Image (cartoon, rainbow, N blue to C red):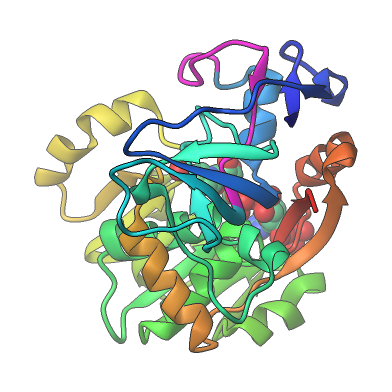
Amino acid sequence: MKAVVTSDYGSVEVLNIENVEKPTIGKNEILICIYACSVNPIDWKIRKGLLKAVSGKKPPKILGGDFSGIVDEVGAEIKDFKIGDEVWGHINALKGGAYAEYIKVNTNNICLKPKNFDFIQAASIPLAGLTAYQSLVNYGKIKENSTVLINGCTGGVGSIAVQVAKFLGCHVTGVCSAKNAEYASSIGVDVIIDYKQENILNSNKTFDSIYDFVGNMTFSESKKIIKEQGAFITLNPSFPLLIFGGIMNCFRSKKYKGMLVKSSSDNLNKLKDMVESEALKATVESVFPLEKVQQAHTHSESGRVVGKVVMSLK
Ligand SMILES: NC(=O)c1ccc[n+]([C@@H]2O[C@H](COP(=O)([O-])OP(=O)(O)OC[C@H]3O[C@@H](n4cnc5c(N)ncnc54)[C@H](OP(=O)(O)O)[C@@H]3O)[C@@H](O)[C@H]2O)c1
């Protein structure tokens, strides 16, 4: 099968299309024929060698953490899916495998694709959508009328987080640049802060939870705008935060949490329901054929993407 394989750590030149062996499945596995996959910042961070301590297998490696496609084969013990089902899914991006024509997964990695999405739209949601959903619901513990601050409200994760938070009845303040203000408003942000004009830390507002989807805020500086028992959630946690954060939070009135996205077919189904009820829309900023993976990575690395970059295989 055709796949993008890294030849080394480094610049986009290490990304090349190769012919590799098609995966074979076990009795509890499912083979998916991939129609589209998305580019996430973690992919180019792995490519560059910035995550060597956690990204496991060295090059040569197939990158990619989410996809949409059609079930091609099912293991003998699979009951919930059949050949021909249209699905979307997430796999641990550190392990990778989605920049390819086929991937083997288990039932917790996938669910049926929303009926009103094509494969390109569907590939844009799983990793960023699960990150947004789990950040807000599992880590931020949002409720109806919670006040949330989303730093980076127009990126892959942020744009979905805004829509999930609005769906769940929250009041959303979003930080973005002026050029994206109209888009932020169109997806539901209630109060827009232009980071070039205003530092949110100087605000006299306080929030039940703050989501730093950019990585340029600190918990210590942000404490003054977090309510008592509120939380600050980062997507770029340090090892000490991951290991000791839970214990430390027992002694803090304002909580500091590092989140790492996990596969969950249950959460994917919740996102599917949101899409089918038109509460969640996809923002696909650009689509590249798999062969143009180098350009797709360069574009994602710019840090200016509004919504998602998707690669098509069909
Ligand atoms: N821990 C996990 O499990 C996990 C999961 C997914 C993602 N992540 C991490 O989360 C981060 C965000 O991912 P993503 O896919 O959302 O990234 P992305 O789509 O590349 O983010 C790009 C967006 O960030 C905005 N932005 C850039 N600088 C900003 C600033 N100073 N203030 C506010 N907005 C700013 C840009 O808008 P402007 O052009 O207007 O600046 C653009 O819309 C990445 O570091 C990624 O690796 C972690």
Res 216 visible? no
The front one of 255 and 274 is 274
The front one of 197 and 49 is 49
Q: Position of residue 77 (x, y in %)?
A: 28, 44
| Vertical arrangement, residue 246 with respect to residue 36, above or below | above
Q: Residue furthest left?
A: 250
Left or right of 133, for residue 191: right
The stretch of residues the image draws in magenta is: 52-67
| Vertical arrangement, residue 201 with respect to residue 16, above or below | below
Q: Position of residue 118 (x, y in %)?
A: 69, 71
The front one of 286 and 188 is 286
Q: Residue at x 50, y 61 (%)?
A: 129
| Vertical arrangement, residue 271 with respect to residue 61, above or below | below
Res 255 visible? yes
Give the total of numbered labels.
0
Left or right of 295, for residue 30: left
Q: Quadrant of residue 180?
A: bottom right
Q: Residue at x 78, y 54 (%)?
A: 304
Left or right of 171, for residue 250: left
Q: Quadrant of residue 174?
A: bottom right
Left or right of 16, for residue 228: left
